[in-house]
Image (spheres, rainbow, N blue to C red):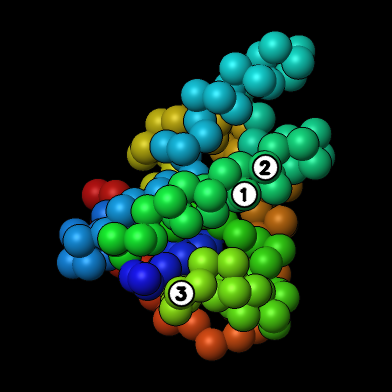
Amino acid sequence: MSQVILVCGAPGAGKSTYSHQLAAVNHGVLIDIDVVSERLVRLALKLSDHDPNDRDSCFFKDNFREVIYEQMFDIAVDNLIANAVIIVGPFTRELQDPHWPERLEQRFQSKVSIHYVTCHPSIRKKRIEARGYLRDRAKLKHWAHYIQYYEDEKRPCFDHVLIDNNKDNTE
């Protein structure tokens, strides 16, 4: 079986850009949380009378977060037979679970490497503004409140590859 690389970090840190590079170098399958789930999440939120751009409320996190991650992992398992797999998502809670990498290796029956992408909040804000996603409007409108969630951002509590992405490439 091939390897699994999980690329984690806060929104706007540069996970997707970095992951595209990893996928090219490793000739791997890229499973990005936004590509895998965006259309279905928007529809489900709309049908449940919630803001289709919401990704930060308790409702979203309680009802979609785990299901989306599980779906990504299922897709990864199906592709591991012949390919390296790069999985992209914040995985905020999981980064503080010291046993998460071992559980992933058991699930995937494959070597797992965690890459943590980080950069300064001011750079993340510029990147989020530049990408112009509807789902980011609430983040930007309430930036001071939103950034508090990531203000005390801790690096993973286990071995990982640190990607310092402080280069401001939005100009």
For label 1, count other residues whose C-alpha is less than 10 Å away and answer few (under 14), some (14-19) or many (20+).
Answer: few
Residues 109 and 112: in front is 109
For mark 3, give the secondary structure.
loop
Callout 2: few (<14), some (14-19), or many (20+) C-alpha neighbours within 10 Å?
few
Which label belongs to residue 102?
none
- Could you tell me if the residues under marks 1 and 2 are in contact, i.e. CB atoms within 8 Å? yes
Give the vertical position of 93 relative to 55 (above or below).
below
The three-letter code of the residue at mark 3 reads: Ser
- Would residue 11 be visible to someone looking at this image? no
Residue on which the image places disc 3: 110
Alpha-carbon span between mark 3 and mark 1: 17 Å
Q: What is the x, y in percent for residue 32?
A: 42, 47
- Quickly name the residue at label 2: 67
Picture coordinates of residue 58, whole percent (x, y): 81, 40
Q: Amino acid at mark 1?
A: Glu
SS type, badge 2: helix
What residue sits right under mark 1 in the picture? 70
Of circles 3 and 1, the one toward us is 3
